Image (cartoon, rainbow, N blue to C red):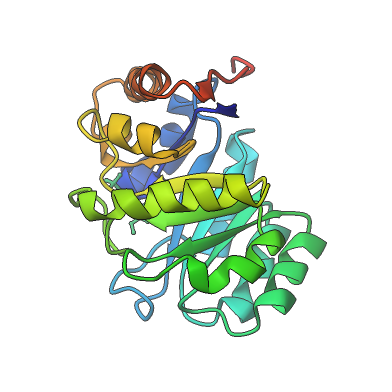
């Protein structure tokens, strides 16, 4: 059994009202997903370390930082020091993986490994014990509002089997194109942590949209259970 978790992605929020976007999902979002982009690893620019520091003062929701940057070895621990509760690095960008995950954990955060749609998980099997979360991208990283890549579904199923067979207790997260049309197939494939940007912040009522997504995931997968969240 695993908890069905929904992480609203602040990339889809109004950048002039990021604090309001965080508060809008208090008591509903398990974590908040904070995308970090550097114009190099992806052709877009997003949230700085100072934003993480500032977010910590406006919400108690734990922050999940998804680093889409070159040289995460240099920058990842800084996000943990600023108060991120999880820091995810991309497999395609990290150079010294053990050193970087050790640094994130030493700074007090959980660790995530992200792979782009074409990057095989198998290559990192012997490193998975260094991580608390595995993020399978269901779009090419860089922008919100893209279409869910159905071709990633077999990779999700294989990752689910791999984690279960090896007794690895990582959360299995997807990011990209998660919405009312796609969440059920992802839940059935074995996902337990769903990042949703447009589907949450594009809705008139973000908290209601989030809970509707969670209800769909719970109905689609017998291995998912509802979380116990403190109402904010
Ligand atoms: C894009 C980001 C995502 C993005 C997802 O690279 O990593 O977190 O916000 O947006 P949606 O849910 O709109 O696909
Ligand atoms: Zn993301």
Q: Residue at x 60, y 48 (%)?
A: 165
Q: Position of residue 190 (x, y in %)?
A: 44, 38
> Residue 8 at x, y = what percent?
42, 37
Q: Residue at x 42, y 24 (%)?
A: 221
* Residue 186, quarter of the rendered image: top left
* Left or right, 146 with reference to 71: left
The quadrant of the image that shows the N terminus is: top right
Query: Is residue 108 or residue 221 the one in the foreground?
Result: 221
Vertical side of 61 occupied by 63: above or below: below
| Residue 149 appearing in the image | no
Q: Would residue 37 be found to the left or right of residue 87 on screen?
A: left
Q: Residue furthest front?
A: 165
Across and down, in percent, residue 232 comes to: 59, 18
| Towards the viewer: 69 or 125 | 125
50 versus 72 height, above or below: above
- Above or below residue 226? Residue 118 is below
Residue found 65% across the figure and 83% down from its top: 96
Residue 208 in view: yes
Q: Is residue 217 left or right of residue 142?
A: right
Q: Please state the horizontal and vertical placement of residue 111, each as a whole percent of the image.
A: 65, 58
Task: Locate residue 113 relative to residue 77 in the image: left or right.
Answer: left
Q: Residue furthest right?
A: 106
Q: Nearer the viewer, residue 19 or 159?
A: 159
Count of numbered circles on the image: 0
Tell me which corner region of the image, top left, top right, bottom left or bottom right, holds residue 194: top left
């Amino acid at each position: 059994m695993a908890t069905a978790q929904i992480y609203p992605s602040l990339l889809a929020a109004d950048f002039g009202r990021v604090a309001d976007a965080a508060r809008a999902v208090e008591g509903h979002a398990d974590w908040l997903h904070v995308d970090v982009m550097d114009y190099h690893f992806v052709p877009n620019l997003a949230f700085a370390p100072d934003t993480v520091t500032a977010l910590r003062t406006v919400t108690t929701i734990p922050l999940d930082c998804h680093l889409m940057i070159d040289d995460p070895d240099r920058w990842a621990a800084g996000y943990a020091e600023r108060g991120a509760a999880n820091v995810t690095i991309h497999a395609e960008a990290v150079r010294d993986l053990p050193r970087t995950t050790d640094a994130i954990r030493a700074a007090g955060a959980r660790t995530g490994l992200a792979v782009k749609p074409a990057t095989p998980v198998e290559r990192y099997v012997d490193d998975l014990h260094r991580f608390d979360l595995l993020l399978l991208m269901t779009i090419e990283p860089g922008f919100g509002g893209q279409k869910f890549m159905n071709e990633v579904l077999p990779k999700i199923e294989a990752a689910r089997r791999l984690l279960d067979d090896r007794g690895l207790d990582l959360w299995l997260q997807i990011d990209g194109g998660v919405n009312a049309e796609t969440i059920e197939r992802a839940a059935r494939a074995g996902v337990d942590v769903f990042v949703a940007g447009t589907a949450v912040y594009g809705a008139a009522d973000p908290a209601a949209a989030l809970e509707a997504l969670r209800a769909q995931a719970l109905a689609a997968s017998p291995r998912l259970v509802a979380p116990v969240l403190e109402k904010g």
